[in-house]
């Protein structure tokens, strides 16, 4: 779907929800997409992209960043502690802070670099055993712990379970953010970003609807 059509859908969703379009950031999720498609979206003017693997992003983004200025990259997939350093060299935002060990490692690297990426804590709202994210019961404590470490937390992120109504999970995430005084809400993908906007999403992560289906599931 052309980028302009996605923008129109975002505008309509904002209007329906009585929200300002400027308060919703579109992250174009380029993981597993051929370079030619990524370049065409860059040529259309999109500058904010999401990748879910550090290594894949390291392979393709330095060259794109040389060609197109002002690119901002968001890491939306799991981050291993031993990849924090390269991740901070490449990414402007990390959506998947989900454990104490990673928080400690981030503090070290942030202090060494003197700049902090935008940080979102991933919450496993569906409490799925195979899925990353802090459990809903532990989220308040974990936010406080990160803040005590001087990590500035922008908001919360979630990936709802595949077979459940996503809006229930969006509402739950919004409630957890609100009670902790956090503004950022990273939620909503190709199939459900309008309902995420209705429930307060500030960052939507849209892949297939922009780029077409990925070659391999990721
Ligand atoms: C792949 C991915 C997306 C984008 O999914 P689409 O269905 O292609 O829009 C969003 N968020 C995360 C965490 C992803 O891994």
Image: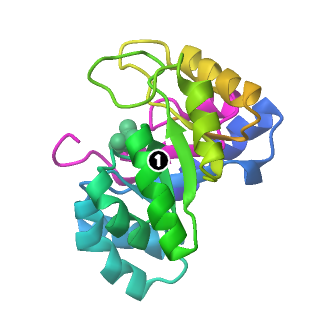
Which image quadrant: the C terminus?
top left
Q: Is residue 19 left or right of residue 102?
A: right
| Ligand 1 position by quadrant | top left
Please check the rendered image and state whether residue 203 is part of the magenta-colored stretch, yes or no. yes
Does residue 40 lie above or below 12 as drawn? below
Q: Is residue 24 left or right of residue 93?
A: right
Q: Secondary structure at mark 1?
A: helix
Span shown in magenta: 189-218
User: Residue placed at 52% from the left, 39% from the top?
Assistant: 121
Between 6 and 171, the residue placed more toward the observer is 171
User: Residue placed at 33% from the left, 50% from the top?
Assistant: 52
x, y percent for residue 6: 55, 48
User: Residue placed at 61% from the left, 18% from the top?
Assistant: 172
- Colouring convention used in this rendered image of the protein: rainbow
Residue 13 falls in image quadrant: top right
Does residue 175 lie above or below 29 as drawn? above
Can residue 215 be seen?
Answer: yes
Residue beneath label 1, please? 103
Between 113 and 149, the residue placed more toward the observer is 149
Residue 109 falls in image quadrant: bottom left
Residue 9 falls in image quadrant: top right
x, y percent for residue 45: 54, 72
Can residue 2 be seen?
Answer: no
Please check the rendered image and state whether residue 11 is part of the magenta-colored stretch, yes or no. no
Does residue 89 lie above or below 1 as drawn? below
x, y percent for residue 67: 40, 87
Residue found farthest to the bottom: 66
């Amino acid at each position: 779907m052309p980028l302009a059509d996605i923008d129109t859908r975002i505008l309509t969703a904002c209007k329906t929800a009585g929200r300002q379009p400027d308060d919703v950031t579109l992250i174009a999720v380029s993981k597993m997409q051929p370079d030619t498609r990524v370049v065409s979206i860059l040529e259309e003017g999109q500058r904010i992209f999401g990748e879910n693997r550090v290594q894949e992003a390291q392979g393709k983004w330095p060259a794109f960043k040389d060609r197109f200025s002002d690119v901002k990259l968001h890491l939306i997939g799991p981050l291993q502690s031993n990849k924090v350093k390269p991740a901070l060299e490449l990414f402007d935002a990390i959506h998947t802070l989900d454990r104490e060990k990673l928080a400690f490692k981030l503090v070290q690297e942030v202090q060494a670099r003197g700049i902090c990426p935008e940080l979102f804590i991933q919450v496993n709202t569906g409490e799925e055993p195979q899925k990353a994210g802090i459990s809903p019961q532990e989220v308040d404590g974990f936010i406080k712990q990160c803040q005590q470490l001087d990590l500035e937390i922008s908001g919360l992120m979630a990936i709802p379970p595949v077979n459940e109504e996503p809006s229930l999970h969006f509402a739950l995430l919004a409630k957890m953010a609100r009670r902790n005084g956090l503004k950022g809400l990273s939620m909503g993908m190709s199939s459900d970003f309008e309902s995420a906007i209705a429930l307060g999403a500030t960052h939507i992560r849209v892949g297939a609807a922009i780029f077409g289906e990925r070659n391999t599931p990721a």
